[in-house]
Image: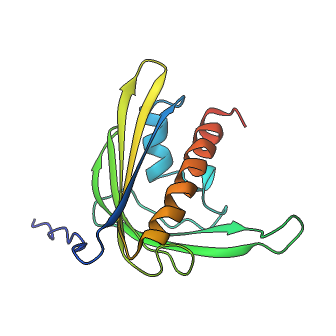
Amino acid sequence: MTTDPIRVPDLSDRPHRLTVERSMIAGEHTLYEGWTEEFDRWFAAPGSVLMRAEVNAPFFFETEFAPEPGATPTRHPHYGRFLRLVPNHLVELTWVTGRGGTEGAETVLTVELLPHPIGTHLRLTHAGFLDEASRDNHEAAWQQILERQDEALTGSD
């Protein structure tokens, strides 16, 4: 049986990247499952996830945000595919969203899970942004998203 080669996006014309690090209470296994099988537990809108944790497998999910309390939530579709998976240690995937996100650019998101005395040290690198503004918006968002992930996956929210 032959395996199709993994086609990694060429990011050479999109050099903007960010790195966010956070000490998480959740363990490596819990975080790995959160990134590969349980997106709707901490990030995606319930019922919107189509995902199989396999290299080269595509995924889809939506997030929903209301601009203000009581307003109708806006749907934000996310698409991608898994590039590398090392159980309990590394998740790398492509990440594509629309306006206000990656602006349609195929970016690469790498999540490294490193042992830490009280849980896990998570290093998230997101590369391939079209411009600094998109990168900066994502950097601020990832800080909040990782905090929410840890709360949701440890039951401390």
The residue nearer to you, when weighing 84 against 73, is 73
Give percent across and percent down for residue 47.
Answer: 65, 65
Name the residue at 41% across, 74% down. 131
In the image, farthest residue toward the front: 132
Looking at the image, can residue 58 be seen? no
Give percent across and percent down for residue 10.
Answer: 22, 74
Q: In this rendering, is residue 71 above or below 152? A: below
- Residue 90 appears left or right of 41: left
The residue nearer to you, when weighing 12 against 9, is 12
Name the residue at 49% across, 56% down. 139
Name the residue at 72% across, 67% down. 65
Q: In this rendering, is residue 65 above or below 87? A: below
What sort of colour scheme is used for the picture? rainbow
Task: Count up the numbered dots.
Answer: 0
In the image, farthest residue toward the right: 70
In the image, farthest residue toward the top: 117
Quadrant of image for the C terminus: top right
- Residue 85 appears left or right of 141: left
The residue nearer to you, when weighing 59 against 43, is 43
Give percent across and percent down for residue 42.
Answer: 61, 50
Name the residue at 49% across, 75% down. 97
Give percent across and percent down for residue 151.
Answer: 64, 38
Looking at the image, can residue 18 be seen? yes
Q: In this rendering, is residue 68 above or below 53? A: below
Quadrant of image for the N terminus: bottom left
Q: In this rendering, is residue 134 above or below 136? A: below
